[in-house]
Image (cartoon, grey):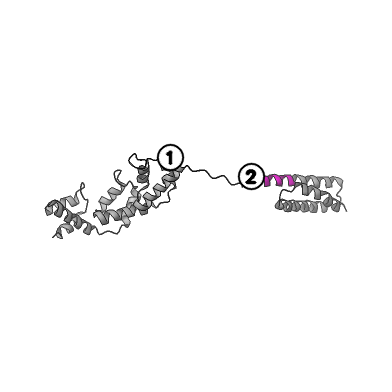
């Protein structure tokens, strides 16, 4: 009969402590577990009943405190307001990446340049940090452009891609581009040779030297030989 009294007395206690539907379920589980433990002892008395009620109260308070803490932690943070200048810089950066296939450093310099977009360094840094761009793909697109329109050599394109006065890609990005560009370097050398012959009336020997020069076109000896052998 003592177990029945404990259940009746503890019910109001449980209701006054509940924080949510889940808390009621957890508290009920605690009550059942404690009573079951006490029920195993046939010599239970009023002191054990008081101990049970105290244990229930302490556990319900602990659960309620933890639930409140979880609720506080789960509160979503407010979104940071991005300045309009930053948003504008990001849109410009996207345009330079998508339309002109520029490098990260190249875009940053263009955004901050006095002869370019004149954004603040902070806005430009935000733009390049948040720009969703594939820099390897941009480098490859630039390499294809240099090959198809300017008929440059493999070494010449690489140097142009990494140059501080050129595209400003990283060496890794430039190497990816060179490794993946679809180009006929012999054909490029021949086109360059024809250009020198037609516009500058250079001799075959002088053209050969220009094609292979470290200060010129940087074609290989074999590519330059092919070009000279196929000049009209």
Between disc 2 and disc 1, whose residue precedes?
A: 2
Instruction: Please provide percent x and percent y for residue 214.
Output: 21, 47
Label drawn at residue 72: 2
- Badge 1: residue crowd in 10 Å (few <14, some 14–19, many ≥20): few
Left or right side of 78 for 49:
right
Q: Residue at image x 81%, y 45%?
A: 51
Specify whether residue 200 is painted magenta.
no
Counting labels gives: 2
Q: Where does label 1 land, which residue?
A: 122
Instruction: Please provide percent x and percent y for residue 231.
Output: 14, 59
Specify whether residue 66 is painted magenta.
yes
Magenta range = 60-72
- SS state under label 1: helix
Q: Residue at image x 77%, y 45%?
A: 57
Of residues 108 and 183, the one drawn nearer to the viewer in this rendering:
108
Residue sticking out furthest to the right:
1
Q: Can the viewer see residue 27 in this picture?
A: yes
Q: Can the viewer see residue 40 in this picture?
A: no
């Amino acid at each position: 009969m003592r177990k029945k009294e404990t259940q009746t007395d503890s019910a109001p206690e449980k209701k006054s402590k509940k924080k949510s539907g889940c808390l009621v379920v957890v508290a009920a589980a605690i009550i059942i577990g404690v009573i079951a433990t006490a029920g195993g002892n046939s010599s239970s008395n009023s002191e054990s009943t008081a101990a049970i009620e105290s244990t229930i109260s302490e556990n319900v308070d602990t659960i309620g405190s933890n639930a409140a803490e979880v609720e506080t932690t789960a509160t979503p943070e407010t979104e940071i307001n991005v300045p309009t200048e930053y948003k504008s810089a990001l849109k410009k950066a996207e345009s330079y990446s998508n339309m002109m296939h520029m490098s990260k450093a190249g875009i940053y310099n263009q955004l901050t340049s006095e002869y370019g977009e004149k954004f603040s360094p902070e806005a430009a840094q935000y733009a390049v940090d948040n720009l969703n761009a594939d820099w390897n793909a941009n480098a490859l697109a630039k390499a294809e452009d240099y090959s198809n329109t300017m008929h440059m050599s493999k070494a010449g394109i690489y140097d142009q891609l990494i140059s501080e006065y050129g595209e400003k890609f990283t060496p890794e990005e430039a190497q990816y581009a060179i490794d993946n560009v679809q180009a006929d370097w012999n054909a490029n050398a021949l086109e360059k040779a024809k250009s020198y012959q037609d516009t500058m009336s250079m001799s075959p020997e002088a053209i050969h030297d220009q094609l292979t020069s470290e200060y010129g076109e940087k074609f290989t000896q074999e590519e330059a030989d092919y070009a000279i052998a196929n000049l009209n």
